[in-house]
Amino acid sequence: MSSLAENSVAVTEPVGIARIERTPALLPALRAVWLRELLLFRRYWPAVTFGSLVEPLVYLAGFGIGFGALVSSVDGRSYPQFLGLGMVLTSVLFSSVFTGMFETFNRRAFQRVYEALLSHPVDAWEVVTAEASWIAVKSCLYGCAPLLVTVALGLPVHPQLALVPLIGLVAGFGFALAGMWVSCLVPAIDWLRLIVSGVLTPLVLAAGVFFPVDRLQGWAGTLVALNPVYHCMQLIRHAAHGAVHAADLGHGAVLVLGTAAAWLLAVRAMGRRLID
């Protein structure tokens, strides 16, 4: 009996080790980060959700009613619908970038949360990916609120409309990574306000959120074409209107390649800050 027990232990132990080795390396960090974020989100969700949901709706009501009385339609659609889709983008953009910049800086420089995570057998790329994935999902959900309001304003419901949350998810992941990268570049958290005023605001204004920018020519048209937020806006509008076409492959390529570049930059910058 004792020899049988010893044989069973000798057989079962390697199986358990093999199962651990086959487990993807990202899963432990993803599980730890998401569990922590969910526990924290249960405590502060009213404050964060209020700003992320209500602010785009306030803009939609104010600009939609005000400019809607002056502008009857944009590209054959009512201005409130045009602006509502713009609010989908801004909701995803600001909720993901702001979290990626300010909260990441706070957790890295002051709370030392990432140092505690790295004391376990995880790497910087796992922490960055897990953190950005949580931010992306949260931002995508925030972007669905103005989308539902836009549907209530008369936006037709069709199968391609389901692509809008997917686009918001990928865009939120990329914007969160970009914010994390920027948070590693500045010497103090107050410098991030310059990024908001000097970079994010011009990008939003040149993305076609409040007015169409497709017909801009010369240097202005070149700047619009180089604006990654513009390409996200185009994807959202075309999917929401059921007008996805071949040109959207280029917009999608910019979104995917930009997200991949932001991931590489964020992982390298975070690793340099936390490990090197």
Image (tube, grey):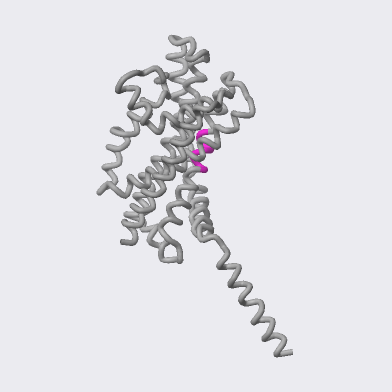
Q: Which residues are magenta?
A: 137-143
Judge from the rendering whether residue 19 lies leftward or rightward of residue 176; answer left or right: right
Q: 195 and 48: which one is in front?
A: 195
Decide: is 98 above or below 22.
Answer: above
Decide: is 30 above or below 242.
Answer: below
**Residue 119 drawn at (x, y percent):** 41, 66
The residue sitting at 31% across, 20% down in the picture is 218
**Residue 103 drawn at (x, y percent):** 38, 47
Q: Is residue 248 visible?
A: yes
Q: Quadrant of the C terminus?
A: bottom left
Question: Of all residues shown, which one is farthest toward the front?
Answer: 246
The residue sitting at 46% across, 40% down in the picture is 256
**Residue 240 drawn at (x, y percent):** 56, 26
Q: Is residue 211 visible?
A: no
The residue sitting at 47% across, 32% down in the picture is 250
Decide: is 177 above or below 122.
Answer: above
Question: Of all residues shown, which one is farthest toward the bottom?
Answer: 2
Q: Quadrant of the N terminus?
A: bottom right
**Residue 34 drawn at (x, y percent):** 51, 53
Magenta stretch contains residue 231: no
Magenta stretch contains residue 141: yes
> Tag count in the figure?
0
Q: Main secondary structure of the magenta part?
A: helix
